[in-house]
Amino acid sequence: MRVVTEGVGCHVAFGTNPTATEQDYYVPVTDPGRISLGPVTTLRVVGITTGAGASGNKTLITFPEGMASPFGPGDAVSLTVDGVPAFDFSHKIVNSVNNSAGVGGAFSGQILVDYDSSSITAVYNQNNYASMRTSVIVAVKTQSGSGLAFIQQVQVS
């Protein structure tokens, strides 16, 4: 992530629900900051079960056979399904992960996401490409007074 400040320096925090403080990464006005968000995490989705979980208001995501979930409990994830926007969601929290072999006769990872999909009437079709990815929120606190922060996701190799 690249951060450029204007006016005053700022402190930057990122994660599932961050609050920037003076102890977080500092970006001065004179030098853009480059912050690693870690590896890119994304995976194809082959199954979506709506109204899942004990309370019936979660969403169960199934990954391709042989693929364990790269997402862990507490991670924030976003889902995009081509052609069926009813299934799309942004920045929802993973409740649990099941990577054990033979889950309901399947050999693929599954995660339970804190997204209430119980009112979705559409049926997921594997022909509609679906992908899940990690998502983060960025919080900024100015050093003093007011200023601007420009935040851009970049990929460095």
Image (tube, rainbow, N blue to C red):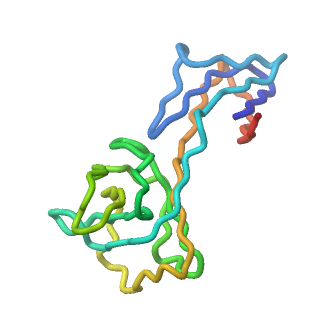
Above or below, 139 against 143 in this view is below
Above or below, 6 against 48 in this view is above
Above or below, 11 against 64 in this view is above
Image location of residue 5, percent across then percent down: 77, 27
Image location of residue 152, percent across then percent down: 74, 40
Is residue 113 among the parts visible in the rendering? no
Is residue 54 among the parts visible in the rendering? yes
> From the image, which quarter does the N terminus lie in?
top right
Left or right: residue 72 compared with residue 126: left
Image location of residue 15, percent across then percent down: 49, 36
The residue drawn where x is 52% and y is 48% is 134
The residue drawn where x is 75% and y is 40% is 154
Left or right: residue 138 compared with residue 77: right
Q: Looking at the rendering, which quadrant does residue 146 occupy?
A: top right
Image location of residue 100, percent across then percent down: 26, 52
Q: Nearer the viewer, residue 142 or 96?
A: 96
Q: Which residue in the rendered view is the most extreme toward the top?
A: 23
The residue drawn where x is 74% and y is 39% is 155
Above or below, 18 against 27 in this view is below
> From the image, which quarter does the C terminus lie in?
top right
Q: Nearer the viewer, residue 141 or 81?
A: 81
Q: How many marks?
A: 0
Q: Which residue in the rendered view is the most extreme toward the right?
A: 30
The residue drawn where x is 53% and y is 76% is 85
Q: Looking at the rendering, which quadrant does residue 34 occupy?
A: top right
